[in-house]
Amino acid sequence: MAIWIEEDAKVLVQGITGKQGMFHADKMVEYGTNIVGGCTPGKGGQTVELQGRNFPVWNSMTEAITTTDADATVIYVPPPFAAEAIMEAADAFDSVKGEGVIVCITEGIPTLDMVKAVAYVYNRPGIRLIGPNCPGIITPGENGGAKIGIMPGHIHAKGRIGIVSKSGTLTYEAVAQTMSIGEGQSTCIGIGGDPVNGTGFIECLAAFESDSQTEAIVMIGEIGGTAEEDAAAWAAENVTKPIVGFVAGATAPPGKRMGHAGAIISGGKGTAEEKFAAFEAAGIACAKDPSELGSVLLESLQKAGLR
Amino acid sequence: MNIHEYQGKELLRASGVPVLDGVHCKTVDDALAAYDKLNSKVVAVKSQIHAGGRGKGSLYSPTSRELVMEGGVKIAFSRDEVKTYAENILGNILVTIQTGEEGKLVRNLYIESGCDIVHEYYLALLVDRENKSVMIMASTEGGMDIEEVAHNTPELIHKISIDPNSGLMGFQNRDLGMALGLSGKALKSFMKMLAKMYAMFVSNDCTMVEINPLVKTGDDDIVALDSKVSFDENAEFRHKDWDDMRDLSEEEEVEIRAKESGLSYVKLDGNIGCLVNGAGLAMATMDVIKLYGGEPANFLDVGGGANEEQVKTAFSIILEDPNVKGILVNIFGGIMRCDIIARGVIAATEALSLDVPLVVRLAGTNVDEGKAILAESTLNIHPADDLAEGAQKIVELIGGGV
């Protein structure tokens, strides 16, 4: 089953005619993602060639979704226009079919733009936003699958481990760790490193818990905010599947932004120490080193009688 | 991005929020001229640095490190006192609870009129990550360390959350003012002030506006006596005026230079330099170095699409730090190919004639080609298969921990 994105999900690309959009759309098609076209206002009617095939471009998301019945969209629009692109997609999915998944890759969107966009999406209950400032979401399939984002597709394989993370390359590291013990992934989600984003840890944990394909979960957090603590407390009450966790930033100094806009310890809050403690209190098996995620996961699977 | 109190007050004043008359000064003569101009019996002489706790801080001589004066914010009752305080502050090092032991050199001063204070409040507008909205926080316990108030007497902190589509509503504003015990003229001036401050927060893309204290005067006016304003750097593209407000002397020069090259760099105190792609992995790399007994010298994220030139710049920035005794490169190739990184590493080590041990861990796209390129090189590069091995190797190569 996987979560939110099926292997054959129909996907649109917002900003498909831009350099980033076109490059990654091509990689997605190569992986086997069912791309059905793209949207760039003012370039409607043109086509874009990806992997030797032509894909249509529409002027508006309403037009694109009405024509293709797309399930999801991925946004590669520059920061000044990205929040607007999220809201356009939310409005179009909501009015055309009442549901849809929006994946926003863009890094550097103004925080107050995101406050507005997130509120806009929340007022449309059928719409899910993943990101921004994230690698995207991938549901590996038997042959290809649905890769919606910028992650390297070839490191994944279909399986039973659900992965959720704030970081990009650290997610890839977690994927490689599952592969090192012979496990594949149901769905991997990067929720992004910005202070204000769409889908959070708890929604991902809830979806993995009710997904029949997922049998264990890897959760990767980083310093800043209290999302990890909240998710751990929630998981203690609501998740029966084994969870393995890691938090990046134990050595980060307070008050300094560590690359991601949201990765900052402020007012003594949001430290890795607190997050690890919350994980452990919730019965989450922690790796202190991401190179150990595989062995900790293997142990958890064995304990649960899954290996 | 942070700005000084005097700049924050200029913004508040321009937005219609009541602040006292004040003058920004850079010299003792400026300060005396400001005193003459303000024509106020009492003035505040305030150190301007990007850190809190100034009032309770201490000033030290930058050469002898001897104590010059206690308190970075002083109340002066005469022209002579203004002169003494200005002399004791400008050009000296202010150490506060937020600056760390090294403190900050004070280059700017703010001379502000006095006022008749009846009560001090705390007020802050900030982005609430958990509720994904702007939050306004207020307390009757102004002038104190707000984290202590929140910890000991949380019931004295009042919060409202703003719906971005409707903005700050009248009833929310009134509720907050009444929770502070305000009524009559004071409540009216509070509500007028807060509506303007919220508008300023949004139109300037702030991440925080903190006023501690906000005061009620003898005339029941509400006045911002302090200001701490931070901007969201992601919104810089639509605020051309921020360049003029940026005080580069308050920021780390090397971090600014790194940013201009598309790199994200933060200097730390250890001796193992790190070069990593991705912010999360860069933090994890530092953590693992520490886990195996070493101390990271920096955080450095080269980003998702770094080229040979950026890798070279990254190396030269790491090597500027005289503490660096070894470097760990940790790359998980996604879109970025390991063979390109390997070539970049070789070109950089040759160009910079690197003489400290270098451990390179590559994984992901084209990893075999990347490893082969490194193996063929005659340079002293130690390969590692995973992060743990990489960290152990570099710690060993520099002869153990710090």
Image (cartoon, rainbow, N blue to C red):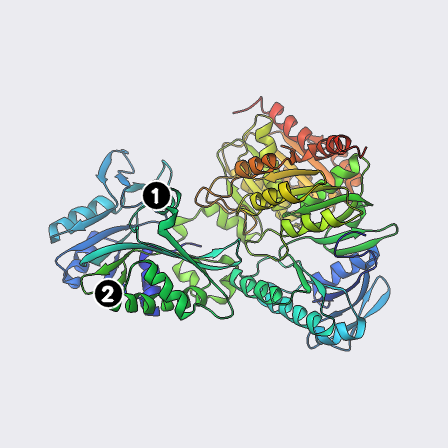
- At label 1, which amino acid type do we have? Lys
Q: Nearer the viewer, residue B160 or A109?
A: B160
Q: Chain of mark 1?
A: B
At 79% from the left and 40% from the top, the residue drawn is B369
Residue A51 location (% of width, % of height) = 84, 61
Q: Quadrant of the C terminus of chain A?
A: top right
Quadrant in the picture for residue A239: top right
Q: Residue furthest top?
A: B399
Q: Nearer the viewer, residue A270 or B111?
A: A270
Residue B283 location (% of width, % of height) = 58, 40
A28 relative position to B237: left or right: right
Residue A222 makes an appearance in the image: no
Q: Which residue is mark 2?
A: B221
User: Around disc 1, counting alpha carbons within 10 Å, would you say few (fewer than 14), some (14 to 19), or many (20 or more)?
Assistant: many
At 78% from the left and 50% from the top, the residue drawn is A153
Q: Which residue is mark 1?
A: B104
- At label 2, which amino acid type do we have? Asp
Residue B166 location (% of width, % of height) = 49, 70
Residue B306 makes an appearance in the image: yes
B205 relative position to A12: left or right: left
User: Around disc 2, counting alpha carbons within 10 Å, would you say few (fewer than 14), some (14 to 19), or many (20 or more)?
Assistant: some
A118 relative position to A14: left or right: left
